[in-house]
Amino acid sequence: MSKHKDKVVVITGGARGLGRAICKRLAEDGAKIALADILDCSETIEQSGLDSDRILQQKCDVTSAEDIESLKNEVNSKFGGCDILVHSAGIFPACPFENLSFELWKKVQSVNLDSAFHLCKAFLPGMKEKKWGRVISISSNTFYVAPPALSHYVASKGGLIGLHRVLSAEYADFGITVNTVAPMLTRTEGAEEFFAENKGMFDAVLEWQDIKRPAEAADIVGAVSFLASDDASFVTGQTLPVDGGTVKL
Ligand SMILES: NC(=O)c1ccc[n+]([C@@H]2O[C@H](COP(=O)([O-])OP(=O)(O)OC[C@H]3O[C@@H](n4cnc5c(N)ncnc54)[C@H](O)[C@@H]3O)[C@@H](O)[C@H]2O)c1
């Protein structure tokens, strides 16, 4: 219960999938949580069992700097700032490069990568003032595996990894660590939608893993919880694959 006691965590994409599972784990460990999503987060709140003084829900499109500014203001006024930023919101529509429009390319960069720019601009100054902070974004091990039909997605997740590596160097003096977690296929609502449209890829992914079962969201949250904790204070600038042994760095 005490691992993240009274730490304030902002989780994007908290309405479902990995964001919901991360919320549940960090809530169990004592955190106060702000959920930001374009979808309603009531089910996550219900499943987390948090009292209203420990939870905040904010409709927020992570592509919008204005939405993120107002998220920051709400977090500051309710909780007095953010200690841990977990950026899980993301989209992964498959499309071979030959058919990929520039509109879809830009949309994926905007949701998956530009969002991190806005979020870090909003929340890093407060962490710097407190001289403690954690930034954890969900990248993807597709950056290493580079499967077909995901050029736009892999580019966005690679950009996220690059951004976090440099922010690690720029913010280390202020007690702030900056890392990403890289899952492979994980059973979430988003992944179920993806694989419904991309039959066959599911089995291919299992072939690459040492552990021959699909990951559940619960398999990913331990890595996030560790990186968010004091135990990980000397771990920064890293991308941690949590993928059943697919990628060995
Ligand atoms: N599930 C997987 O297999 C897998 C693997 C590797 C990486 N990831 C990454 O993990 C993260 C979470 O994925 P998931 O599987 O939980 O997906 P999901 O679709 O189940 O959940 C994603 C959440 O992000 C929210 N979201 C989408 N666009 C948004 C926007 N513009 N503003 C605010 N919120 C927005 C959605 O509403 C949703 O609640 C994503 O960044 C994804 O790329 C997932």
Image (cartoon, helix red, strand yellow):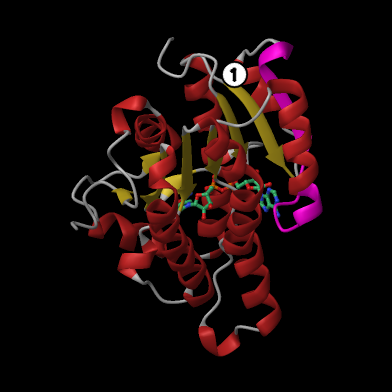
Name the image quarter holding residue 37: top right
Q: Is residue 167 visible?
A: yes
Q: Nearer the viewer, residue 163 or 55?
A: 163
Please name the residue shown 71% across and 79% down the image. Answer: 103
Q: Is residue 42 visible?
A: no
Q: Is residue 8 magenta?
A: no
Q: Nearer the viewer, residue 100 or 179?
A: 179
Image x and y of residue 59, in percent: 79, 40
Disc 1 Cβ-to-ligand 1 distance below 8 Å: no
Image x and y of residue 48, in percent: 59, 18
Image x and y of residue 231, in percent: 29, 27
Callout 1: helix, strand or loop? helix
Three-letter residue code for mark 1: Ser
Side (left or right) of 173 relative to 37 = left
Name the image quarter holding residue 213: top left
In the figure, 125 relative to 95: above or below? above
- Residues in magenta? 52-67
Please name the residue shown 75% across and 22% down the image. Answer: 78
Quadrant including the N terminus: top left
Q: Which residue is mark 1?
A: 48
